[in-house]
Amino acid sequence: MSEGLSGAPQPPWKKNFEIIKWKTKHAQGEAELRNVREKVATDELTGLASRRFFMERAQSALDNLYVGRQKEQRQRIGIVPAVSIIGIDLDHFGAINNDFGHPVGDKVLQKVAATLMENVRSIDVVGRVGGEEITILFLGPLDVALKKADDLRAAIQALRFEEMGEKEVTASFGVAAVGPDEQPTLEVILERADDALRAAKKPDATHPEGRNRVVEYSTLKQV
């Protein structure tokens, strides 16, 4: 029989009780820590990745891609084959909030987020990086990313909201990929996707009203 602080013998049941109490407190602490981590990693409204978590995952993917290009490393790590960034911005989202109210705007964001998550792979990361701005870390080459972006664009346009009647929700997309012979920083590749996204929103000869389309960054240099 063990002794307590007073030196008196401590019954076994009390020792077991203290052990159980410590384990319970420790488990509660771990659960609270997991909850905090999940809150930091997840956007509260949409359930998408938070900006911070998205940036961390995107940087990790770029690092993996660049290291994987070194021949001596190819057999020792899981190689990211290609990295593309898909930038998304909901068209006229301010008007949706103004005309139908912010609760409807929130519902639109939530349904769009769910649609995106249902149509990407588990290896891709969909993050809410701004108000109505969403960015996808797409682990694949440019041609596949462009096809995915247009599929997502069509899926968003097909959504319907009872509160909005026949009014459609559309989105513009900008896509940029890391070229095979370059190593741009994360900031640079995100800026390229953003440039393509801004171009997607602008009217031109083929899209007089602009918006609701996909633009690839490399095509901007040809204009």
Image (cartoon, rainbow, N blue to C red):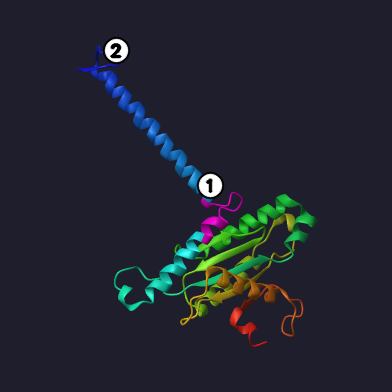
Quick one: 136 or 51, which is closer to the camera? 51
Quick one: 121 or 77, which is closer to the camera? 77
Mark 2 residue type: Ser
Residue 144 placement, left or right of 72 = right
Q: Is residue 63 visible?
A: yes
- Residue 216, image x and y in percent? 60, 79
Q: Nearer the viewer, mark 1 or mark 2?
A: 2
Residue neighbourhood size for the residue with mark 1, other residues' Cα within 10 Å, grouped as few (<14), some (14–19), many (≥20): some
Residue 35 placement, left or right of 128 = left
- Residue 16, image x and y in percent? 28, 24
Mark 1 residue type: Lys
Q: Is residue 81 above or below residue 160?
A: below
Query: Residue placed at 52% from the left, 65% from the top?
Result: 119
Find disc 1 in the rendering and name its residue.
39
Residue 92, numbered circle: none
Q: Is residue 49 magenta?
A: yes
Residue 6, numbered circle: 2
Q: Is residue 182 above or below residue 115?
A: below
Circle 1 — which element?
helix
- Residue 157, image x and y in percent? 66, 68
Residue furthest out toward the bottom: 222
Please report the bounds of the magenta region as a residue range. 41-55
- Residue 131, image x and y in percent? 67, 57
Circle 2 — which element?
loop
Q: Is residue 43 above or below residue 88?
A: above
Q: Are marks 1 and 2 in contact (CB under 8 Å)?
A: no
Query: Residue placed at 30% from the left, 69% from the top?
Result: 76
Name which quarter of the figure residue 222 lies in.
Answer: bottom right
